[in-house]
């Protein structure tokens, strides 16, 4: 009957079905056909969604640069037509791809942009984007993560204190979990910082035993002892460190770095999850992929 838009949508749905089955090359074949028809008839919404679906398929194949190329095209079209949902999704998918490439500053930048848009339109997909930031926090440690976020917020003209409240409400920091032994160790350091003599002794013993982490462990012990007012003990623990250079204003930050290092020594507890799918065509529900297990996303499935 010559319904080109319906034909394109059918190709898109077939692509989604093959994607859900884990047959990514076949999904690409059908999403490419959808893209061709959408471009022929000037269907910008369909074109943008086809780009997004192609980006997701290439991501699942581990071709992150190709995924970025298609998600960038999706982003451009979404911005042209005022599709805020698509724009937020595209930023999120770009953040996920950059995260997988290990480019954490770029991943954070894209995730901040996407989360602010999705928050504005009250989209539940904001959860998935915030999970990217949880993944970065897990990889870099809390202190380093906060510095990266501060830098990105400054470059984007975003108020960091306000954005940090979004991260807290979204559970980004809560997603970085400690095992029970690590929690006990953090409590020990905290207790030492409050001047508990027994805890201070435990800190010294822990630092002595953990030779493989001696650099940051010693620093952590020094800071804990200084906070406890035990300057002489701090000097004995690490005579090589210039204690005069450790300003009290940064002690809390150093302790936060210690906590993040403790987190990284434990088991990786971040859950894998799916990518954000465009919403133009009704898609088959996405399920967890068992094929291609090496290709992970840090987004939680909602």
Image: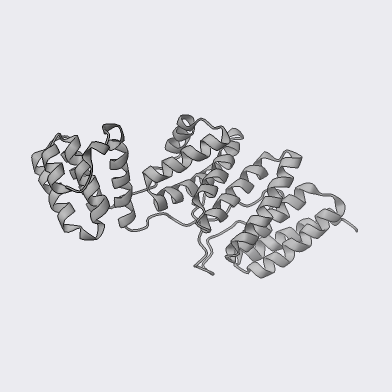
User: In which quadrant of the rendered view does residue 168 lie?
Assistant: top left
Which residue occupies 66% across, 63% down?
Answer: 17
Say whether residue 272 is left or right of residue 4: left
Front residue of 289/207: it is 207
- Residue 14 rendering spot, x and y as whole percentages: 71, 63
User: In which quadrant of the rendered view does residue 229 lie?
Assistant: top left
- Report whether residue 144 is seen: yes
Q: Is residue 37 above or below residue 197?
A: below
Q: Residue furthest right?
A: 1
Q: Is residue 37 above or below residue 280?
A: below
- Residue 151 rendering spot, x and y as whole percentages: 49, 39
Q: Is residue 80 above or below residue 24?
A: above
Say whether residue 272 is left or right of residue 50: left
Q: Is residue 41 above or below residue 289?
A: above
Figure disc tally? 0
Which residue occupies 42% across, 48% down?
Answer: 137
Task: Give the quarter of the figure containing the N terminus.
Answer: bottom right
Which residue occupies 66% across, 43% down?
Answer: 87
- Residue 100 rendering spot, x and y as whole percentages: 52, 58
- Report whether residue 284 is seen: no
Q: How does the figure colour the protein chain or chains? A: one colour
Front residue of 231/90: it is 231
Front residue of 86/146: it is 146
Front residue of 281/135: it is 135
- Residue 241 rendering spot, x and y as whole percentages: 22, 46
Which residue occupies 20% across, 59% down?
Answer: 211
């Amino acid at each position: 009957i010559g319904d080109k838009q319906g034909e394109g949508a059918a190709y898109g749905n077939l692509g989604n079905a093959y994607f859900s089955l884990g047959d990514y090359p076949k999904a690409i074949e059908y999403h490419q056909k959808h893209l061709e028809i959408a471009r022929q008839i000037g269907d910008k919404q369909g074109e943008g969604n086809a780009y997004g679906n192609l980006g997701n398929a290439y991501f699942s194949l581990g071709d992150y640069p190709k995924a970025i190329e298609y998600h960038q095209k999706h982003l451009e079209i979404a911005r042209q037509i005022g599709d805020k949902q698509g724009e937020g999704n595209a930023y999120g998918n770009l953040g996920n791809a950059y995260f997988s490439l290990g480019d954490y500053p770029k991943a954070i930048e894209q995730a901040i942009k996407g989360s602010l848009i999705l928050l504005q339109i009250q989209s539940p997909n904001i959860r998935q984007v915030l999970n990217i930031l949880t993944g970065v926090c897990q990889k870099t440690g809390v202190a380093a993560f906060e510095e990266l976020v501060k830098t990105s917020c400054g470059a984007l003209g975003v108020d960091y204190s306000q954005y940090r409240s979004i991260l807290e409400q979204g559970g980004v920091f809560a997603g970085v979990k400690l095992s029970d032994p690590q929690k006990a160790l953090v409590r020990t350091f905290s207790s030492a910082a409050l001047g508990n003599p027994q805890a201070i002794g435990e800190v010294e013993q822990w630092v002595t035993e953990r030779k493989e982490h001696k650099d940051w462990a010693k620093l952590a012990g020094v800071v804990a002892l200084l906070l406890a007012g035990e300057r002489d003990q701090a000097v004995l623990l690490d005579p090589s460190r210039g204690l005069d250079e450790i300003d009290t204003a940064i002690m809390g930050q150093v302790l936060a770095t210690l906590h993040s290092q403790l987190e990284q020594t434990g088991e990786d507890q971040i859950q894998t999850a799916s990518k954000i799918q465009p919403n133009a065509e009704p898609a088959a529900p996405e399920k967890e992929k068992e094929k291609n297990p090496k290709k992970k996303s840090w987004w939680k499935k909602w």
